[in-house]
Amino acid sequence: MLTVRNLTKTFGNYKALDQLSFTIQPGSILGLIGQNGAGKTTTFRLILDFIQADMGTVLWNGQPIGEADYDRIGYLPEERGLYPKLTIEEQLLFFAELRGKSRKEIAPQIDAWLEKFQVKGKKTDKIQTLSKGNQQKVQLIATLIHQPQLVILDEPFSGLDPVNAQLMKDAIIELRKLNACVIFSSHNMDNVEQICDQLIMLKNGKTVLNGTVQSIRESFGKTRLYLQGESLDEEQLRLHSGVVALARREDQSLVLKLADAEVGKEIFSLVTQNGYLPMFNQQPPTLEEIFKMKAGEKDE
């Protein structure tokens, strides 16, 4: 279990992180979101003791993280770092040895890992011959091959196409099944929403959201209404006093932003007067909409 309590860090007069607290249970995934400069990478560096906190504690299973614990940690930094003139095999063996594993133990596993992540290349190919995406997958393998219990991933989806992004998501979900503690940052709210058990949003170093994805969404009320039907009067809906905004999607369905969740009842009575309606779906705002709302708010 990873426990972070009141973690605070300043650089000169700039407070990069302000009393951040959270706990990650084994087999749980925490998503860390926020705009650039919000404090995400600073959080990771403080956990890993790359930089020293002004205040606060980081505990692994109730104890400060010690030297021996680093062999149980997998870290994928935002700045990718591979040795271009090494082969894939040499690179993976080198990183595994840094985590206390022997070449004899790791070497037989490499082919299976390359196949699992669909790396285009042989293990004897040099890193510099691989595409950027395949280099990123090799670095992910290097992060996971020693079977860490705590995994920290800084923008793991950056630059990945949809197929490779799905491979990354599958790998993160598998870590949950292996009972690892996982924390990752991302600007892709769909990925966060799909795989996170818990979510924290930082803004200027302060925690502005903390909870499960569903509880956070529900806290904003069911103010998004999705409608589809031939009898819908778009202009009538747009002029309704409880409708803040209305948009038509490519599938010709309508999305209404409501002033209050209770307005949904009025809209339901209005649009069902002419009978059957194929779609009436009232939901909280999406995580992406919430992110934009919180990012745009002034600091309290």
Image (cartoon, helix red, strand yellow):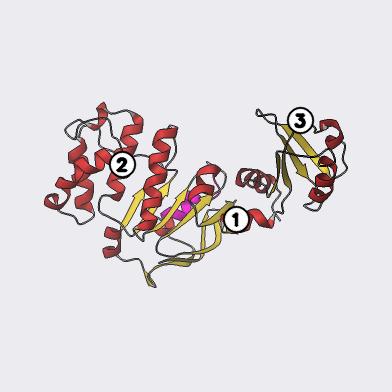
Q: CA distance from mark 1 to mark 2?
A: 32 Å
Residue indicated by mark 3: 230
The residue positioned 34% from the left and 58% from the top of the image is 178
Q: Main structural element of the magenta stretch: helix, strand or loop?
A: helix
* Residue 205 can be seen, yes or no: no
Location of residue 175 with respect to 247 vertically, above or below: below
Element class at badge 1: helix
Is residue 267 found left or right of 94 in the rendered image? right
Q: Position of residue 41 (x, y in %)?
A: 46, 49
Residue indicated by mark 1: 214
Point out the residue furthest to the front here: 275
Is residue 128 magenta-colored?
no
Q: Position of residue 95 (x, y in %)?
A: 23, 47
Q: Position of residue 65 (x, y in %)?
A: 35, 66
- The answer to whether the residues at label 1 and label 2 have Cβ atoms under 8 Å apart is no
User: Dot 3 surroundings within 10 Å: few (below 14), some, or many (20 or more)?
Assistant: few
- Location of residue 29 (image quadrant): bottom left
Residue indicated by mark 2: 139
Mark number for residue 37?
none
Circle 1: residue type: Gln
Q: Earlier in the sequence, mark 1 or mark 3?
A: 1
Q: Position of residue 245 (x, y in %)?
A: 78, 38
Element class at badge 3: loop
Front residue of 39 and 3: 3
Where does the magenta region start and end?
Answer: 37-45
